Image (cartoon, grey):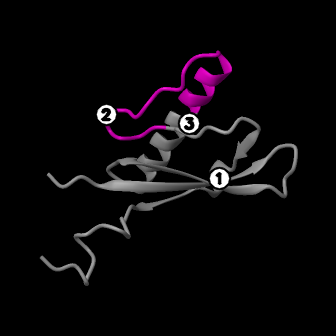
Amino acid sequence: MHLRIYEVDVPMHDTTDPARCGVHVFTGVADSPAAALRRAHEVYGAALAAHTAGLEIPGKQPDRWGASGLRPGREMEWPAARASRWHNSVSWTIRSDFAL
């Protein structure tokens, strides 16, 4: 079975300085873009809950989803999140100049 790895890009901004903004990227295995968005939101929620409770942020799950790099004080803009198939731009299997 070929694994489908998705990337979910979620815009975010600093709650104290909205001019400071960026994108939080999640990756993991999913069946569809909708499932990828759901899993990204779930692992982010679990990480935020653990952080709020003073616990260690959970690591990567068996389906490769995780929320490392949690930034307290940043607001995630979930309605603007986008999911698509992940493509490793530095993979040796897709480089045209690779020779054995």
Distance in Å between CA atoms under marks 3 and 1: 14 Å
The residue sitting at the right extreme is: 16
In the picture of the structure, the residue carrying the numbered disc 2 is 62
Secondary structure found at label 1? helix
Q: Nearer the viewer, residue 54 or 85?
A: 54
Residue 62 pos. (x, y %): 31, 33
Q: Main secondary structure of the magenta part?
A: loop
Location of residue 65 with respect to 31 vertically, above or below: above
Disc 1 residue type? Answer: Pro
In the picture of the structure, the residue carrying the numbered disc 1 is 79
Q: Is residue 26 magenta?
A: no
Give the extent of the magenta segment: 45-66
Mark 3 burial class by Cα count in 10 Å: few <14, some 14-19, many 20+ = many
Image quarter where the C terminus lies is bottom left
Distance in Å between CA atoms under marks 1 and 2: 26 Å
Disc 3 residue type? Answer: Tyr
Secondary structure found at label 2? loop
The residue sitting at the front extreme is: 100
Would residue 73 appear left or right of 32 to someone viewing this image? right
Say whether disc 1 or disc 2 marks the residue closer to the N-terminus: 2
Say whether disc 3 or disc 1 marks the residue closer to the N-terminus: 3
